[in-house]
């Protein structure tokens, strides 16, 4: 009598653990933000992002964030990718919006901040630094 019961319990526990197993990739996603950005931006797949890739990604993300196509991004359109003080710093003409030139200059300066060893590329480790995270946030 106990053997079929155990088998049933085994099946029941296997079914019970299944959702847990499918949940783990979602949990891992929490720390995958930077590497997801790296994957998306690294178009030549060499495992690092260079300035050219950053400019291409920044240009694409600018276009995606500017649905009214007026050529500028205001704080609302930036959707929290940039802090208020970050916006101020990136907005030398002080009109409260970023045009594409300002946005690309911002991406370039964040890229340089994120590349402290100055080898012209930002690798996965550099992308996890505070400057790298700021860059990833802007490009994602
Ligand atoms: Ca690359
Ligand atoms: Ca401006
Ligand atoms: Ca580097």
Image (cartoon, grey):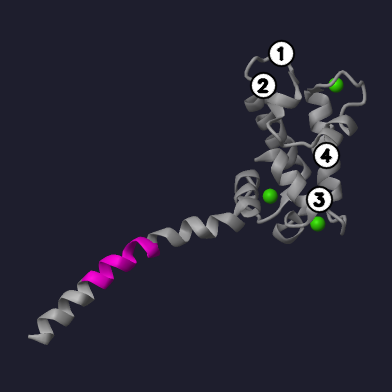
Q: Are marks 4 and 2 in contact (CB under 8 Å)?
A: no
Q: Nearer the viewer, residue 91 or 17?
A: 17
Residue linked to disc 4: 108
Residue linked to disc 2: 66
Residue farthest to the left? 1
Q: Are marks 1 and 2 in contact (CB under 8 Å)?
A: yes
Where residue 134 appears, as percent x and y from the top left, is 76, 46
Q: Residues within 10 Å of mark 4 (few under 14, many from 20)?
A: some
Q: Choose mark 4 or mark 2, whichever is in front.
A: 2
Residue linked to disc 1: 70
Work out how far the residue at label 3 is from the one at label 4, CA to CA, in angstroms.
12 Å
Q: Is residue 136 left or right of residue 8?
A: right
Q: Say if disc 4 is inside 8 Å of ligand 3.
A: no
Residue drawn 26% across and 66% down? 15
Q: Say if disc 3 is inside 8 Å of ligand 3.
A: no
Q: Is label 4 in a helix, a strand or a loop?
A: helix
Q: Nearer the viewer, residue 126 or 42?
A: 126
Where is 103 relative to 30, above or below?
above
Where residue 38 appears, as percent x and y from the top left, is 65, 50
Work out how far the residue at label 4 is from the one at label 2, CA to CA, in angstroms.
19 Å
Region of the chain picked out in magenta, as a range: 12-21
Residue linked to disc 3: 131
Residue drawn 10% across and 81% down? 4
Q: Is label 3 in a helix, a strand or a loop?
A: helix
Mark closest to the chain's N terminus, 3 or 1: 1
Work out how far the residue at label 3 is from the one at label 1, CA to CA, in angstroms.
29 Å
Residue drawn 87% across and 31% down? 90
Q: Is residue 17 left or right of residue 77?
A: left
Where is 72 relative to 132, above or below?
above
């Amino acid at each position: 009598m106990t053997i079929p019961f155990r088998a049933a319990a085994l099946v029941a526990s296997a079914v019970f653990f299944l959702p847990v197993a499918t949940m783990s990739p979602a949990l891992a996603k929490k720390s995958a933000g930077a590497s997801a950005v790296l994957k998306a931006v690294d178009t030549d797949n060499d495992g690092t992002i260079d300035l050219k890739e950053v400019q291409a990604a920044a240009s694409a993300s600018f276009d995606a964030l500017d649905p009214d196509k007026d050529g500028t991004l205001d704080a609302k359109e930036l959707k929290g990718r940039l802090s208020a003080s970050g916006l101020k710093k990136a907005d030398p003409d002080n009109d409260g919006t970023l045009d594409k030139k300002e946005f690309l200059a911002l991406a370039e300066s964040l890229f340089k901040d994120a590349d402290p060893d100055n080898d012209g590329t930002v690798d996965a480790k550099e992308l996890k630094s505070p400057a790298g995270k700021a860059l990833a946030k802007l490009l994602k």
